[in-house]
Amino acid sequence: MKFEGWVALRYLRSPFKPALLRLVTWLSVVGVTAGVIALVIALSMDSGFRRALASRLLEVTAHINLQPKGNEGIRDWRPLIARLSKTPGVQSIAPAIYNTVLVTAKGQVKGAVLKGVDPKLEIASDQALRRLVSGTANFSPNADGVPAIIIGNILARSLDLKVGEFLTVTSPEGSLTPMGLMPQSSRFRVAGIFDSGFYDYDAHWAFVTLGEAQNLAGIGHLVSVLEVRLYNPDRAPQIAPELVREAGPRFQATTWMQLNSALFRALSLEKLVTGIFIGLITFVAGLNILVALSLTVVDHAGDIAVLMAMGARRRQVRSIFVFQGLAVGIIGTAIGLAVGYAAAWAANAWRLIPLNPEFYSISYVPFHTSALDALWIAALALGVSIAATFYPAWSAARLQPVEILRYE
């Protein structure tokens, strides 16, 4: 160990320090530790929310939506799917029809999004239909010819519906009659109830076959959108233009990132603001280090003068206090990272912080730790610790041995 580091550690561990100096030193360590713990937990929580929302969105929504630029719908969608499925990176493509409807059951009325699907293709690609809490994903009509519908568990609870019971779906896009456009209604049997884990879908979505959705919307054999799922969702911006080139100029593609851009921008901004404001705790810890080192300079002025009289250079004196502040920063950062990551892991593993899914879309606060976050948190804490040493180190190096030793 270098001379400067040895002296710095001696000053830190000295049992003869004044009580005030010992207290301020410990407060410096505690301050750095608290700042690092707060940053680790806050950033882990922000990253956890982002990952949880993205994961749940990708389980129930397409990675790329391909649809016509106008409102004419897609007529020859089967051969189009066959062509587009050959695009590298495409996992599956499913047709869909979306319609905003009213669902009536047991005297209650709820608004819902009705999605018409091809059952085989949809079950293979959409996680929602694979997460049934009751019933089956069988869309076959019953013995009386009543078609099947699968609804979200929250929507089922709000309408007090169980598997096998009936409901009526009314679409505002109905049939054109001499009296004008008349709403179209159909009776359905609840074949299954799904739990996607995403509140908006569980509370407002329902699935029927393409044929039933086409009849309700009055659009014949058209579909409104082709939902493309990829092996790697992050490649959606690169694959979307290839799909448009293959489909033709009358089509447009929208990626899942574009559809949810406002949400993820808000989460990124929240993470930045959280890091800045909680980082102020580390700044306060830096002020404690500055105070502790300044008191150390005053308390050990005689020792410093003796060292300089014996040949210690001013650069070495400065290094003593830089090493001392760095040691405080390293100790506080190491403890903070260990405690922060342990706390984040435990809170995520045991779901210690519950949430109301009606407001947050998930039932608990998720935490996701990142090695990159640990690196820049450690860099910030150590940078503040070193910066806090500059003034005390400069003051110690400016001491005049003759003036101090004259009165010793």
Image (spheres, rainbow, N blue to C red):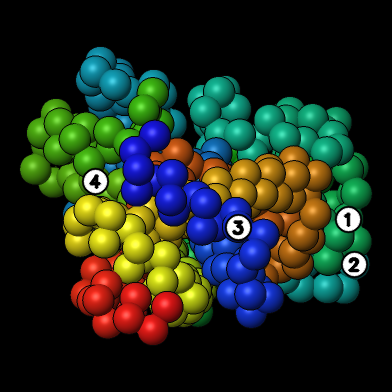
Residue 137's x, y, as percent?
73, 30
Disc 3: which residue: 14
Q: Amino acid at mark 1?
A: Leu
Residue 197's x, y, as percent?
69, 48
Q: Amino acid at mark 4?
A: Ala
Which residue sits at x=34%, y=38%? 2
> Is residue 292 or residue 353 the one in the foreground?
292
Q: Which mark is residue 57?
A: none
147 relative to 77, above or below: below
**Structural distance between the alpha carbons of marks 3 and 1:** 73 Å
Question: Which quadrant holds the N terminus?
Answer: top left
Q: Are marks 3 and 4 in contact (CB under 8 Å)?
A: no
Residue 318's x, y, as percent?
27, 61
Disc 4: which residue: 253
**Structural distance between the alpha carbons of marks 2 and 1:** 8 Å
185 relative to 96, above or below: below
- Lower sequence index among marks 3 and 2: 3
- How packed mark 4 is, by other alpha carbons closer than 10 Å (few <14, some 14-19, many 20 or more), is many
Q: Closer to us: mark 3 or mark 4?
A: 3
Quarter occupied by residue 42: bottom right
Which residue sits at x=58%, y=62%? 29
Which residue sits at x=42%, y=78%? 408
> Is residue 322 or residue 190 the one in the foreground?
322
- Say what secondary structure mark 2 lies in: loop
Q: Amino acid at mark 2?
A: Lys
Disc 2: which residue: 106
> Is residue 97 or residue 285 the one in the foreground?
285
- How packed mark 2 is, by other alpha carbons closer than 10 Å (few <14, some 14-19, many 20 or more), is few
Quarter occupied by residue 193: top right
- Lower sequence index among marks 2 and 1: 2
- How packed mark 1 is, by other alpha carbons closer than 10 Å (few <14, some 14-19, many 20 or more), is some
Residue 326's x, y, as percent?
41, 54
